[in-house]
Image (tube, rainbow, N blue to C red):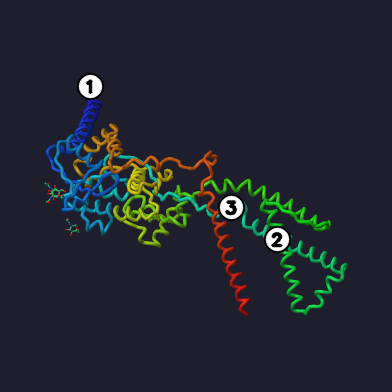
Amino acid sequence: MCKAAVTCKNKRLISITFLAILFSILGEFSTDADPEGRHFNYIAFHNPPYDTVIRGPNGTVTIFGASHNLVEWLSVKFKFTYNTSLVNQTLVEKYGTHEALFYQLVNDKNVDGIACSFYLTMDRVEKMDFTSFTWNEGFNLVVPRPEEESRLFAFIGPFQPSVWMMIFISLFVVVVLMTLFTWVYNSQRRNNVSDATVEIDQIDDHRRSNAISKILFDIFSTHMIYAINILTNQGGREAFNRASFRILIGVWVLCAMVLVNSYTGIVTSSLTTPKLKPSIDSLEELAASKQIAVLIRFDTSLGEQILKATSGVYKVLGDQARRNPDQIVGDPFKLSAKLETGRYAFPFVRTYSISFVGSQYKKDKKCRFKSSKPLSVSSGYYSWLYKKNSMYTKSHSRALMDLWESGLMRYWINTQPTIPKADQCFADNKRRISRLSPIQLSDLTSAFLILGIGVGLATLSFLLELIHSKLKRYK
Ligand SMILES: *[C@@H]1O[C@H](CO)[C@@H](O)[C@H](O)[C@H]1NC(C)=O
Ligand SMILES: *[C@@H]1O[C@H](CO)[C@@H](O)[C@H](O)[C@H]1NC(C)=O
Ligand SMILES: *[C@@H]1O[C@H](CO)[C@@H](O)[C@H](O)[C@H]1NC(C)=O
């Protein structure tokens, strides 16, 4: 078969190397220990909504959740026994929950794994073994639902403040002009009929100026009432047969028509359309918001990225959080307590936001929170972690791939009782503008408020007048 000794030797060499490689591969597989019959210690922690830890009144602890289901599934597949204990609370206070778990997994001989999937970062991969991913999802913000802006002063809305200012000024200018015209016409008439002035001339100077200002004020106020009547669409008559006066009034009526028509065109919708305070749907909008501050879990990968960022919106948020250190937390319980105050937004995985919004709805019977649009952060793949160079990483990794393909994990997570249904909170609840229902009282509060204030003021001035005249009589 072998024509030349040299080629034959070569062939044998090649087949030997091939076999050697084959054995070494098989050898690798054989170091992948069979977990059958072993005992695993997992550490668990409160990780809503995926995993839940409930502390009973007498120190008992109940742990359930999707990761628990996963461990159960693995233990049946590989026929191992396991126990789950809680993460060491002393370490949690020191490092934050996630970092405490990593610390225990790396340093504690008794701990074999963590009952949870984690986002992989360079730091985590260097310290620990990771399996194929068991979960995948993107990020959202949990934000307080924007409230409706008060419509008490919506009637001012149709015009800009400068327009109101201009109307006010021109009203005054027109009325002052009208008063001036009337005064001049009247004094001309008085000069013609000279007896009328004699009377005034005879009385002393002080009383004369008093009388003049009273006449002026009377003229001014009748003209003012007329001008306002025109402006508010009430009509009224102003009889004067001088051309200049008619031109002035004609121009005022024209101007008022334009103003009134443009106002009435807008005021209904301005009164009846609820205006929401601006809502927050991205990290950029959160960074710009004055009312809502960011909450950061420093022990999560996203929190770490925000806190370590040196540019962009992450840095802005990181700086904001560093200015108020109580916005940086490492404990899920503290975090949800803070979030419930409605003053913070929290970027985290989507399921968390859905569960938080739902559980708050269950508690308050009101959608106080909402889940933002997906953030433009790349969606995360989450893996199961083991000790570095663990003998079980590979076999579990292959099994977990099967698990992912089966879709069981998604089913487990979606059916967690910690994700209450709150469909109302996820529907777009914008009130339609063209609605057929009658205008509500809340839409017209401002009109009644003005009426109320006016009635109050009138009563007050009536009382003052009464007191004034009483005092005069006593003098
Ligand atoms: C603790 O309480 C649970 C019920 O909440 C009960 O079943 C259990 O026996 C109690 N354990 C002890 C040690 O009292
Ligand atoms: C928790 O960790 C601290 C610090 O490493 C240690 O002193 C303590 O004994 C641990 N507690 C438990 C219950 O393991
Ligand atoms: C359960 O886990 C703890 C902590 O790892 C360990 O000390 C304990 O021995 C385990 N229990 C059993 C029954 O193996």
**3 and 1 marks in contact (CB < 8 Å):** no
Nearest to N terminus: mark 2 or mark 3: 3
User: Which residue corresponds to the image point at 79% horizontal and 78% vertical from the top-left?
Assistant: 203
- In percent of width and height, residue 337 lies at 32, 55
Q: Is residue 165 left or right of residue 130?
A: right
Q: CA distance from mark 3 to mark 1?
A: 100 Å
Q: Secondary structure at mark 2?
A: helix
Q: Amino acid at mark 2?
A: Met
**2 and 1 marks in contact (CB < 8 Å):** no
- Res. 464 visible in picture: yes
- How crowded is the residue under tag 2: few (<14 C-alpha within 10 Å), some, or many (20+)? some
Instruction: Write down the residue under mark 2.
Output: 224
Instruction: Write down the residue under mark 1.
Output: 2
- In percent of width and height, residue 437 lies at 52, 40
Nearest to N terminus: mark 3 or mark 1: 1
**2 and 3 marks in contact (CB < 8 Å):** no
- In percent of width and height, residue 187 lies at 83, 68
- Res. 284 visible in picture: no
With respect to residue 465, does 277 lie above or below? above
Q: Which circle, 2 or 3, is nearer the viewer?
A: 2
Q: Which circle, 2 or 1, is nearer the viewer?
A: 2
Nearest to N terminus: mark 2 or mark 1: 1
- Total labels: the figure holds 3
Residue 193 position by quadrant: bottom right
